Amino acid sequence: MASIFTKIINREIPGHIVAEDEKVIAFLDINPLVMGHCLVVPKKEVNYIFDMEDEEYTHLQLFAKKLSVAIKEVIPCLRIGVAVIGLEVPHTHIHLVPLNKMDDINFTRQKLTPTHEELGVIAEKIKRAFIQNS
């Protein structure tokens, strides 16, 4: 059965997509830790990040690095935090989280519940910044 991320990749369900290429897609987390929290996902469904082929793994990481620049341009923050947990969805993904304090990347705390419109505005800004930096 396809993961929820594969359904977003295939456009079977909506996602606030901020960037993509032939191998990777990035979209906003719909229940972010902070606004601008993005997920970077390989289009090829692999459950565990360290099971990825080296070239695919490297491409995913470099894509995340490039996207982090765009997120930081749009969301005022000190840094972009990176987390790979991989327990909640059986499809490799990297969390990119704008950080101003350590607690911003605490996955046990209450998540935000932004509206579809709020997510759309942030997604469009990140998308524009990503394109400008490409």
Image (tube, grey):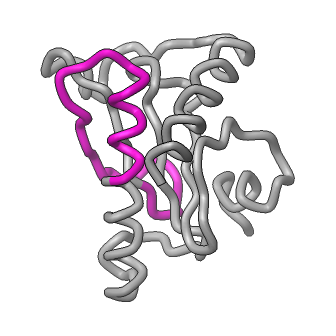
Image quarter of the N terminus:
bottom right
Measuring from the top left, give residue 54's x and y in whole percent.
32, 87
Q: In the current view of this chain or complex, which residue is farthest to the front? A: 132
Residue at image coords 73%, 14%: 117
Image height check: is 114 above or below 67?
above
The residue range painted magenta reads: 66-93
Residue at image coords 63%, 73%: 22
Q: State yes or no: residue 83 in magenta.
A: yes
Res. 93 image quadrant: bottom left
The one of 102 and 90 positioned closer to us in this rendering:
102
The one of 75 and 49 positioned closer to us in this rendering:
75
Image height check: is 96 above or below 62?
above
Measuring from the top left, give residue 69's x and y in whole percent.
33, 41
Q: Is residue 127 left or right of residue 99?
A: right
Total labels drawn: 0
Residue at image coords 43%, 30%: 37
Q: Is residue 67 left or right of residue 85?
A: right
Measuring from the top left, give residue 47's x and y in whole percent.
48, 70
Q: Is residue 103 left or right of residue 18?
A: left
Q: In the current view of this chain or complex, which residue is farthest to the right? A: 12
Res. 45 image quadrant: bottom right
Res. 6 image quadrant: bottom right
Image height check: is 41 above or below 70?
below
